[in-house]
Image (cartoon, helix red, strand yellow):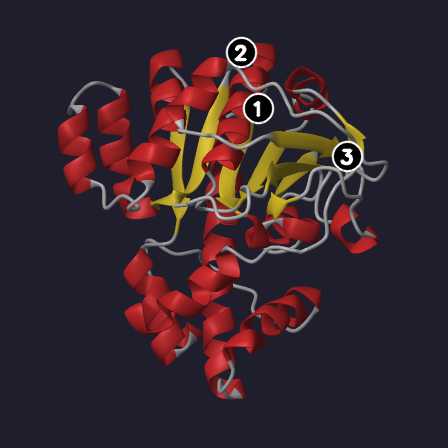
Amino acid sequence: MASLQSSPSISAALLALSLASCASISAGSGPLEVDQESWEATGAELPVALVRTPGQERVTIDEAADALAEADVIFLGEQHDSAEGHAVQLALTKAVAERRGEIVLSMEMLERDSQRLVDMYLDGEIDQEAFRSTARLWPNYQAHYEPAVEFAREGGHDVLAANVYRPVASRVAREGLDSAMGEVWAAATVDASPGEYRDRFDAVMSGHGGVDEEVMDRFFAAQCIKDDTMAESIARRIACDPGDPPVVIHWNGRFHSDFGLGTVERLRSRQPDLNIAVVSMLTDVQLSRPLAEEVLNQGHYIILVQAPPQGAETD
């Protein structure tokens, strides 16, 4: 990893992609101390750790935030079902906001067509119940993402509904990329060309078997329209404050940002001079084990979530 400067028919497969994780794990000892409010807000239970790459040093929230606060854009790559990982993301978001004073909370989990609803909620024009019932929120929004949105609302920070309108991505997966070009809720340009990102996508998706090349091309295009739309959304928001823009903290499934690929490389293609930081996440790990070399390239920092005790119930 470079330095900091530098449709229902397809939903199961794409969800598996967004939840994909490695089996290799991290070094060090002792759990990470996360502020109690972040921990309680997301219902976290298991020990967590935060490591800085490539040296695998255990760091605190404050130590990571000191460095991350220097970035223009911070990608917080996650496992969508990890309460513990979300607690660390929330703590990092709060700590960076303390250092920078103003942030933009950008989210894969909110789609462009909902931006007006998001703004109305932040401005007090609609209440929480109305927002929840109209914004087409993810099933785990209240448990895992609402605490971050509430933090932004209470602190006067903007929230960016960054992702493509979901039916557009589903159409691409069924009909191909041409079917979505010109859509107002999608990026103006989409790059679905071969390369490392496509290779990694194919490697993850191959576990589902029986997917021919033409179908895989459409699935990849559906992935890419999300990446390019999120990147374009972030780039446009930064352009709104050309003098001294606030740091953008973008929450997304980690495949969208691991290894500086996906949304990260799409953002770099639009604004090459941005200082971008990437945080990744691994769950169900043993905190005492060292990370494999490949894992160290996922991000500048990696959030690690301890595997539950054998036989314990999980969500």
Q: Which residue position holds label 1?
A: 92
Name the residue rendered at 46%, 20% in the picture: 38
Counting from the top left corner in percent of width and height, residue 180 is at: 36, 68
Counting from the top left corner in percent of width and height, residue 7 is at: 31, 68
Name the residue rendered at 72%, 18% in the picture: 63
Spatial separation of the CA atoms under disc 3 and disc 1: 19 Å
Q: Which residue position holds label 3?
A: 5
Name the residue rendered at 47%, 41% in the picture: 82
Q: Kindly state the secondary structure of the residue where label 3 is placed.
A: loop
Q: Which residue position holds label 2?
A: 101
**Nearer mark to the viewer, of 1 and 2:** 1
Q: Kindly state the secondary structure of the residue where label 1 is placed.
A: helix
Marks 2 and 3 close (CB-CB < 8 Å): no
Marks 1 and 2 close (CB-CB < 8 Å): no
Q: Residues within 10 Å of mark 2 (few under 14, many from 20)?
A: few
Between discs 1 and 2, the one toward the N terminus: 1
